[in-house]
Image (spheres, grey):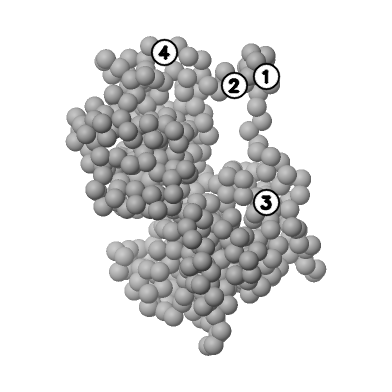
Amino acid sequence: MPFKSLGLTAAFVKAVEEKGYTTPSPIQQKAIPHILEGKDVLASAQTGTGKTASFTLPVLQYLTETKHPKFRPLRALVLTPTRELAAQVYENIKEYSKYVNIKSGVVFGGVNITSQKAMLKYGVDILVATPGRLLDLHEQNSVSFKRIDVLILDEADRMLDMGFARDLNKLISFMPVKRQNLMFSATFSPEIRKLAEGILNNPVSVAAEPQNSTAVKVTHKVYKIDKNKKTDFMIQLIKNNDWQQILVFTRTKHGANKLTEKLIKSNISAAAIHGNKSQGARTKALKTFKENSIKVLVATDIAARGLDIPLLPHVINFELPNVPEDYVHRIGRTGRAGAAGEAISLVCSEETEYQNEIEKLLNEKLDSEIVKGFEPTDTAEPKRAATQSKGSFGKKKKASNTTTPEVKSIKKKGFFGRKKPGNSAPKKKF
C-alpha cells in the first residue's frame, strides 16, 4: 500500500519518500484516513512504528488545504511531555512540510523565552510545545489558542505521570470547544482510556500492536548481577563485544552522573542526560551520541520518550525501572523502524520484583543468565516488598497506592477537569 492510497497529496508523499519510506506502517494505515476525515482519534502504538508521522502528515495536509491567504493564526497544537520529544516532533514536521507553505515552531523550557516570543509574534500554523513553557507564554500574552482547530496530545499517559494534569487542564480551557482531538501514546492503560473519554468526542480507537508490547525484532536479555559489580560487568560487556553505541538507563540523576564518570575513567567515551542538565548540555550530549562521537549515553527516564536514534543497536537497563511500563519506553529506543535491537537488563536481588512486574506486563519470561565472577551475592529484600512492608521508622505500612494524586483528581473531575463539548462552553479553570 503506497502513501498516496491513504489520501495524502503529492507534496507529502514526496517528502515522506525522500526520508526513505515507501510503505506506510500499520499505525499510519489505520490512523491517517480517520484524521483526514476530521475524526477524533485515540491511538496506541509501540515506539519506533511511525507514530509521529501518523498525526503530523494528515494535520499538515488539513492546514494546507484550509489555509487563509493572508492571516496565519495558530491552528494546530502538539503537546509533549519532554523537551527532547518536542524537538523530535518539530524536526519531523519541518521535514514533512518542506514542499508546502506551512510555518511551524517549537517551544520548551530550559532556553531563553525571548526568541520564542519573537517566533510566535510572526505567526505559526502549527506549534509543538511542552505544557509548562506554553503556559508561561500564554500568561505573557505571547500566544493565543482562540483559533485552535486541532489538538494533539503525544504521550498523554506520560504527561499525567509527570504531573502535567493541572497545566493541561488550564491550556485546554483556553481553546475552542469545537476542535479535532488526537491522543497518541506508546501505551494506554484502561484508566487512561477511560479518562480520554472526557476530552475526545466519539473517538475512533486504533492500535498497531497490543498494549505494552515491544518491537518484535528486539531481543531481551537479563543478567543476574551483584549490585556492587554492575559497573565492572557493563564495562567488560562493552569492551569485549566492541559495542560502539549504547543507551544506558539509570533510575536517578546522581546515578547517571556517577556511572558516566566511571565509564570515562575506564576509557569509554560517555555523557549523561537528565533533568538537572541544562538544555544546551542535553542537546549537545544527544548530538554527539547520534554522531557516534561518544559510545555511551547514560540517561534517566526523561529520555525514554522522544529520542529518535536511527539503528540504535543496544539499550542497557543498568537499573530496572520501578514502573514496569517504563521498561517498554526505554527499550523502545532500539529496534525502531523494523531494525533489530538488543535490550539488556542488569538485575540485582532487590530488583527481582521489578523484573516480575515487567514480565507480567509483557506476558513474557525474560531469559536470565548468571556470569561467572559476577554472581549475585547480595541478599537485599526486593525494593517493592521492602517499601510496602515497612515505613520510615520500621513500622508496618500498607501497600502503596500507585495512583498519583493527579490521576485521583482527574478521576473525580473527568479528564483534565473539563466537561465534554456540548451546547455550552465549559467554565474555564484557573
Q: Is 23 placed above or below 189 here?
A: below
The three-letter amino acid code for the residue at tag 1 is: Lys
The three-letter amino acid code for the residue at tag 2 is: Thr
Q: Are marks 4 and 3 in contact (CB under 8 Å)?
A: no
> Mark 3 highlights which residue?
166
> Mark 4 highlights which residue?
378
Q: Quadrant of the C terminus?
A: bottom right
The three-letter amino acid code for the residue at tag 4 is: Asp
Q: Are marks 1 and 2 in contact (CB under 8 Å)?
A: yes
Mark 4–mark 3 Cα distance, whole angstroms, equals: 42 Å
> Mark 1 highlights which residue?
397
Task: Compare residues 382 and 66 and report the one nearer the observer.
Answer: 382
Residue 378 located left or right of residue 289: right
Q: Residue at x 39, y 35 (%)?
A: 257
Q: Residue at x 31, y 65 (%)?
A: 19
Q: Is 275 placed above or below 347 here?
A: below
